[in-house]
Every structure is written in structure tokens, then in C-alpha cells.
Amino acid sequence: MKRIALPVAVLGVLALAVLPGCKTMSSDELKASIEVVDYSSAWVSKYYQPWPPRLILVPQISFRVKNVSAKPLTYVNFNAVYNFMGDPENFGDAFRAAIRGKAVPPGGTSDLIVLRSNLGVDGKNLAGIRDNPQWKQAQVRLFAISKGSAPVLLGVYDVSRDIDFKEPEPVGDQKEPVKK
């Protein structure tokens, strides 16, 4: 019994010494620490098949986070929730555990963070999607979550209607003029 008691006591003392260093960030502290910079958005291809023709485009945002607090930012996750303007239903979302082992120092900026929706719009080709009246202006609600915080809304951003996809040129026999 004494052989087990000593290691357990040592582990208990070590745990109590380490716990004060494991501080969590409140939701208000997290929101006050983050500034979204270099925001951009586009629709990108999730799936393309030339025959039978099918194209799925999804919204994608990219941004960096600037740490405007006096403490390093660590273990911050981001969640993007996409919806069409005027429509309360979400049509897609994305989650990324973006700031992990390498903390963002005070005044520093994170690496580029990209969040691509899991769902989007379906059509036969680019022209079919562009001309579809169901393809309306979209927006994204961007949330941050850290250890000990609830999800914090960082902002609501418009998703550009730019499409970052080009259909390949048709492949096949080209009819050449007959020489006489």
C-alpha cells in the first residue's frame, strides 16, 4: 500500500502545480483577441464530371487572424456556416482546427485559413449554374471556438459570386477541312 501511495501523492502534487498554467480563454476574451484580415471568397469546384455533365460548386472563404491581445493565441478552431441571403436555412458548413501547436504571438498574424463548404449548388456546367435563379447571393457566419469558450461570432461576410473554376476544353476528334 505504501508503494502505491507515494507515486500517487507525487502525481497529485505535480498535477496541482501544472493546472494553474492551463488557463482557458473566455468567450469575451476570445472575441476581443481576434481580428479577421485578408478575407476573400469564391465558389470552387467540389465535383466535376464531363460526361454525363455534372458540376458542383461550393463556397470557400480564406482569411488570416490577427492577434490583437497581449497573450498568444493557441488552440483556436473556426466554424463557417453558409446560407443564401434571406433564407434562414443553412446550406453548408465547414470546420477547421486552424491554430494548433504554433501560437500566434501578440500583434502577429496566422497562416492562411481556408474553409470550404461541404454543400453547394449542382448543375450541368458553369453556364447552367450562372443562369440558375436558385443560385442567389450567399453569406457566411464565421465563428471561433477555443478551450473553455463557447462559439463566438466573429462576423457575417458576403460570399463573392466569383467562380474559381474553368471547364476544360472538349477533347476528341477535331474535324479538319478536307484537302482536294
Image (cartoon, rainbow, N blue to C red):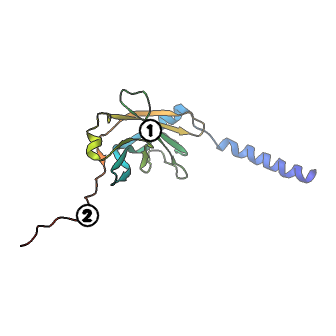
Question: Of the numbered discs in the image, which one, if any, rests on residue 54?
Answer: none
Q: Secondary structure at mark 1?
A: strand
Q: Residues within 10 Å of mark 2 (few under 14, many from 20)?
A: few
Q: Nearer the viewer, mark 1 or mark 2?
A: 2
- Residue that carries the numbered disc 1 in the rendered image: 92
Residue extending furthest toward the bottom: 180
C-alpha gap between disc 1 and disc 2: 37 Å
Q: Locate residue 162 relative to residue 76 in the image: left or right.
A: left
Left or right, residue 125 beside residue 119: left
Instruction: Give the residue at the far front of this rendering.
Output: 180
- Residue drawn at x 60%, y 36% is 148
- For the residue pair 106 and 143, the one nearer the viewer reads as 143
Name the residue at 69% across, 43% down: 19
Does label 1 or label 2 sit earlier along the sequence?
1
Residue 61, horizontal then vertical, whole percent: 38, 43
Name the residue nearer the viewer: 64 or 157.
157
Q: Residue at 52% across / 49% down in the picture?
A: 103
Residue 151 at x, y percent in the picture: 53, 34
Residue at which label 2 appears: 172
The vertical placement of 30 against 168, above or below, is above
Q: Amino acid at mark 2?
A: Gly
Q: Is residue 161 left or right of residue 9?
A: left
Q: For the C terminus, which image quadrant?
A: bottom left
Residue 66 in the image: state x and y as whole percent: 43, 43
Marks 1,2: beta carbons within 8 A: no
Query: Disc 1 residue type?
Result: Gly
Q: What kind of element bears circle 2?
A: loop
The image quadrant of residue 146 is top right
Vertical placement of 50 versus 145: above or below?
Answer: below
28 or 45: nearer the eye?
Answer: 45
**Residue 145: x %, y % from top left:** 53, 38
